Image: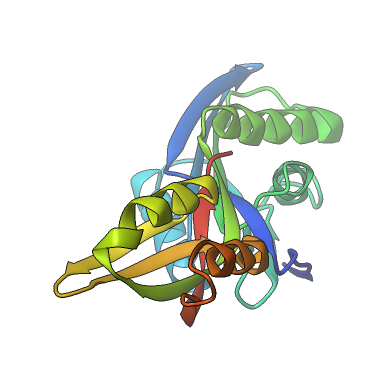
Amino acid sequence: MELTGGKGLEGYTTIAGPVTAEHVEKRSRFLSLAAPVGDEESALALLSEVRTKYWDATHNCYAYILRNGNIQRYSDDGEPQGTAGMPILEVLRRQNLTDVLVVVTRYFGGTLLGAGGLVRAYTLGATLALEKAKLLRMRRCVVFTLTVDYSMYGKLQNLLCEFGAVTLQDDFGAEITLTLRMEADKLPVFSKQLSELSAGRLAPRVVGEEFAPVEC
Protein backbone atom coordinates (compact mmCIF):
# COMPACT_ATOMS: atom_id res chain seq x y z
CA MET A 1 0.00 0.00 0.00
CA GLU A 2 1.19 3.54 -0.77
CA LEU A 3 0.70 6.69 1.28
CA THR A 4 1.81 10.25 0.78
CA GLY A 5 4.12 12.01 3.18
CA GLY A 6 7.31 13.96 3.28
CA LYS A 7 10.26 15.52 5.06
CA GLY A 8 11.46 19.07 5.34
CA LEU A 9 13.70 20.50 2.67
CA GLU A 10 16.42 21.45 5.17
CA GLY A 11 17.19 17.94 6.37
CA TYR A 12 16.07 14.50 7.43
CA THR A 13 17.23 11.57 9.56
CA THR A 14 18.17 8.13 8.27
CA ILE A 15 20.32 5.22 9.49
CA ALA A 16 23.96 4.48 8.74
CA GLY A 17 23.73 0.80 7.86
CA PRO A 18 21.70 -2.41 8.10
CA VAL A 19 20.83 -3.84 11.53
CA THR A 20 18.93 -6.94 12.63
CA ALA A 21 16.99 -8.12 15.67
CA GLU A 22 14.99 -11.14 16.79
CA HIS A 23 12.30 -11.86 19.35
CA VAL A 24 9.72 -14.55 20.11
CA GLU A 25 6.04 -14.08 20.89
CA LYS A 26 4.05 -17.18 21.93
CA ARG A 27 6.44 -19.41 19.98
CA SER A 28 6.22 -17.28 16.82
CA ARG A 29 9.69 -16.14 15.80
CA PHE A 30 10.12 -12.62 14.47
CA LEU A 31 13.25 -11.63 12.55
CA SER A 32 13.69 -7.91 11.87
CA LEU A 33 15.88 -6.05 9.40
CA ALA A 34 16.24 -2.27 9.13
CA ALA A 35 18.39 -0.87 6.34
CA PRO A 36 19.06 2.43 4.57
CA VAL A 37 17.71 2.62 1.02
CA GLY A 38 18.24 5.50 -1.39
CA ASP A 39 15.40 4.82 -3.81
CA GLU A 40 12.52 2.48 -4.49
CA GLU A 41 14.59 0.22 -6.74
CA SER A 42 17.06 -0.52 -3.94
CA ALA A 43 14.21 -0.98 -1.43
CA LEU A 44 12.50 -3.55 -3.64
CA ALA A 45 15.79 -5.30 -4.39
CA LEU A 46 16.53 -5.70 -0.68
CA LEU A 47 12.99 -6.84 -0.01
CA SER A 48 13.42 -9.48 -2.70
CA GLU A 49 16.62 -10.68 -1.03
CA VAL A 50 14.83 -11.05 2.30
CA ARG A 51 11.99 -12.98 0.71
CA THR A 52 14.48 -15.28 -0.99
CA LYS A 53 16.46 -15.82 2.19
CA TYR A 54 13.35 -16.51 4.28
CA TRP A 55 11.38 -18.26 1.56
CA ASP A 56 9.84 -20.65 4.10
CA ALA A 57 8.63 -17.91 6.46
CA THR A 58 4.93 -17.42 7.11
CA HIS A 59 5.05 -13.67 6.46
CA ASN A 60 7.56 -11.02 5.34
CA CYS A 61 5.90 -7.76 6.33
CA TYR A 62 7.52 -4.42 5.60
CA ALA A 63 7.36 -0.66 5.40
CA TYR A 64 9.61 1.99 3.93
CA ILE A 65 9.75 5.76 3.61
CA LEU A 66 11.66 7.47 0.80
CA ARG A 67 12.53 11.13 0.49
CA ASN A 68 12.71 11.15 -3.32
CA GLY A 69 9.19 10.93 -4.66
CA ASN A 70 7.74 11.49 -1.19
CA ILE A 71 6.91 7.76 -0.97
CA GLN A 72 5.63 5.67 1.94
CA ARG A 73 4.68 2.03 1.36
CA TYR A 74 3.84 -0.94 3.55
CA SER A 75 2.51 -4.49 3.32
CA ASP A 76 0.83 -6.90 5.76
CA ASP A 77 1.89 -9.82 3.50
CA GLY A 78 -1.10 -11.96 4.45
CA GLU A 79 -1.47 -10.90 8.08
CA PRO A 80 -4.86 -9.37 9.00
CA GLN A 81 -5.19 -5.89 7.52
CA GLY A 82 -3.57 -3.18 9.61
CA THR A 83 -1.75 -5.50 12.00
CA ALA A 84 1.76 -5.60 10.49
CA GLY A 85 2.80 -3.17 7.76
CA MET A 86 1.13 -0.10 9.23
CA PRO A 87 2.56 -0.67 12.73
CA ILE A 88 6.04 -0.94 11.19
CA LEU A 89 5.42 2.26 9.23
CA GLU A 90 4.26 4.03 12.40
CA VAL A 91 7.57 3.19 14.09
CA LEU A 92 9.44 4.83 11.20
CA ARG A 93 7.16 7.85 11.41
CA ARG A 94 7.49 8.25 15.17
CA GLN A 95 11.26 8.18 14.87
CA ASN A 96 11.13 10.65 11.95
CA LEU A 97 13.19 8.36 9.72
CA THR A 98 13.34 8.38 5.97
CA ASP A 99 15.23 6.47 3.27
CA VAL A 100 14.79 3.42 5.50
CA LEU A 101 13.25 -0.02 4.89
CA VAL A 102 12.14 -2.28 7.75
CA VAL A 103 11.17 -5.91 7.12
CA VAL A 104 9.79 -8.09 9.91
CA THR A 105 9.72 -11.80 9.05
CA ARG A 106 7.44 -14.15 11.01
CA TYR A 107 7.69 -17.88 11.47
CA PHE A 108 4.33 -18.96 12.88
CA GLY A 109 4.66 -20.87 16.14
CA GLY A 110 1.22 -22.45 16.28
CA THR A 111 -0.50 -19.96 18.61
CA LEU A 112 -2.67 -17.15 17.27
CA LEU A 113 -1.70 -13.75 18.63
CA GLY A 114 -4.88 -11.87 17.78
CA ALA A 115 -4.98 -8.45 16.17
CA GLY A 116 -3.66 -6.60 19.21
CA GLY A 117 -0.89 -9.14 19.73
CA LEU A 118 0.19 -8.88 16.11
CA VAL A 119 0.34 -5.08 16.26
CA ARG A 120 2.50 -5.28 19.39
CA ALA A 121 4.76 -7.96 17.92
CA TYR A 122 5.42 -6.13 14.64
CA THR A 123 5.85 -2.81 16.43
CA LEU A 124 8.37 -4.43 18.75
CA GLY A 125 10.20 -6.07 15.84
CA ALA A 126 10.69 -2.75 14.07
CA THR A 127 11.62 -0.98 17.30
CA LEU A 128 14.22 -3.57 18.34
CA ALA A 129 16.01 -3.32 15.00
CA LEU A 130 16.00 0.47 14.89
CA GLU A 131 17.28 0.68 18.47
CA LYS A 132 20.51 -0.87 17.19
CA ALA A 133 20.88 1.56 14.30
CA LYS A 134 23.25 4.51 14.21
CA LEU A 135 21.29 7.58 13.19
CA LEU A 136 22.51 9.98 10.54
CA ARG A 137 21.14 13.51 10.53
CA MET A 138 21.25 14.58 6.90
CA ARG A 139 21.35 18.32 6.29
CA ARG A 140 21.05 20.37 3.12
CA CYS A 141 24.57 21.52 2.30
CA VAL A 142 26.21 23.73 -0.26
CA VAL A 143 29.42 22.84 -2.08
CA PHE A 144 31.65 25.82 -2.82
CA THR A 145 35.18 26.72 -3.83
CA LEU A 146 37.67 29.20 -2.41
CA THR A 147 41.03 30.29 -3.80
CA VAL A 148 43.37 31.83 -1.21
CA ASP A 149 47.03 32.70 -0.90
CA TYR A 150 49.25 30.94 1.61
CA SER A 151 49.35 33.90 3.97
CA MET A 152 45.58 33.59 4.53
CA TYR A 153 45.41 29.81 4.80
CA GLY A 154 45.95 29.51 8.56
CA LYS A 155 43.29 32.10 9.40
CA LEU A 156 40.91 30.52 6.92
CA GLN A 157 41.36 27.07 8.46
CA ASN A 158 40.25 28.40 11.85
CA LEU A 159 37.12 29.91 10.32
CA LEU A 160 36.31 26.75 8.37
CA CYS A 161 36.64 24.69 11.53
CA GLU A 162 34.34 27.06 13.42
CA PHE A 163 31.60 26.58 10.81
CA GLY A 164 32.05 22.82 10.43
CA ALA A 165 33.14 22.98 6.79
CA VAL A 166 34.33 19.72 5.23
CA THR A 167 37.17 19.81 2.70
CA LEU A 168 36.28 17.70 -0.33
CA GLN A 169 39.32 18.57 -2.45
CA ASP A 170 42.41 20.76 -2.19
CA ASP A 171 44.97 21.93 -4.73
CA PHE A 172 48.20 23.48 -3.45
CA GLY A 173 49.67 25.35 -6.39
CA ALA A 174 50.71 28.97 -6.74
CA GLU A 175 47.59 29.56 -4.66
CA ILE A 176 45.44 27.17 -2.66
CA THR A 177 42.13 26.13 -4.21
CA LEU A 178 39.69 24.37 -1.89
CA THR A 179 36.41 22.62 -2.61
CA LEU A 180 34.32 22.60 0.56
CA ARG A 181 30.96 21.53 1.91
CA MET A 182 28.98 23.34 4.61
CA GLU A 183 25.45 23.28 5.97
CA ALA A 184 23.46 25.67 3.79
CA ASP A 185 21.99 27.72 6.62
CA LYS A 186 25.50 28.55 7.89
CA LEU A 187 26.71 30.01 4.60
CA PRO A 188 25.40 33.59 4.95
CA VAL A 189 27.14 34.19 8.30
CA PHE A 190 30.27 32.39 7.10
CA SER A 191 30.39 34.59 3.98
CA LYS A 192 30.10 37.72 6.09
CA GLN A 193 32.89 36.67 8.46
CA LEU A 194 35.06 35.55 5.54
CA SER A 195 34.66 38.95 3.92
CA GLU A 196 35.62 40.67 7.17
CA LEU A 197 38.62 38.37 7.63
CA SER A 198 39.92 39.03 4.11
CA ALA A 199 39.00 42.73 3.91
CA GLY A 200 36.45 41.91 1.21
CA ARG A 201 38.81 39.93 -1.02
CA LEU A 202 37.30 36.48 -0.51
CA ALA A 203 33.82 35.09 -1.13
CA PRO A 204 32.64 31.49 -1.56
CA ARG A 205 31.67 30.42 -5.08
CA VAL A 206 28.80 27.96 -4.78
CA VAL A 207 29.04 25.10 -7.29
CA GLY A 208 26.44 22.66 -6.01
CA GLU A 209 24.05 21.46 -3.35
CA GLU A 210 23.58 18.08 -1.65
CA PHE A 211 22.40 16.37 1.50
CA ALA A 212 25.21 15.16 3.75
CA PRO A 213 25.42 13.71 7.29
CA VAL A 214 26.28 15.70 10.38
CA GLU A 215 26.70 14.38 13.91
CA CYS A 216 23.40 13.16 15.36
| Residue 134 image position (x, y, % from top left) | 50, 35
4 or 112: nearer the viewer: 4
The image shows a total of numbered marks equal to: 0
- Quarter occupied by the N terminus: bottom right
182 or 134: nearer the viewer: 182
| Residue 26 image position (x, y, % from top left) | 66, 16
Q: In the displayed structure, does residue 10 sit left or right of residue 37?
A: right
178 or 49: nearer the viewer: 178
Q: Is residue 86 above or below residue 40?
A: above
Q: In the displayed structure, does residue 64 sit left or right of residue 3?
A: left
- Quarter occupied by the C terminus: top right
| Residue 105 image position (x, y, % from top left) | 53, 39
The residue under the point 46% across, 32% down is: 20
Q: Is residue 9 above or below residue 114?
A: below
Q: Is residue 40 above or below residue 95?
A: below
The residue under the point 58% across, 65% down is: 196
User: Residue 72's image quarter?
Assistant: bottom right
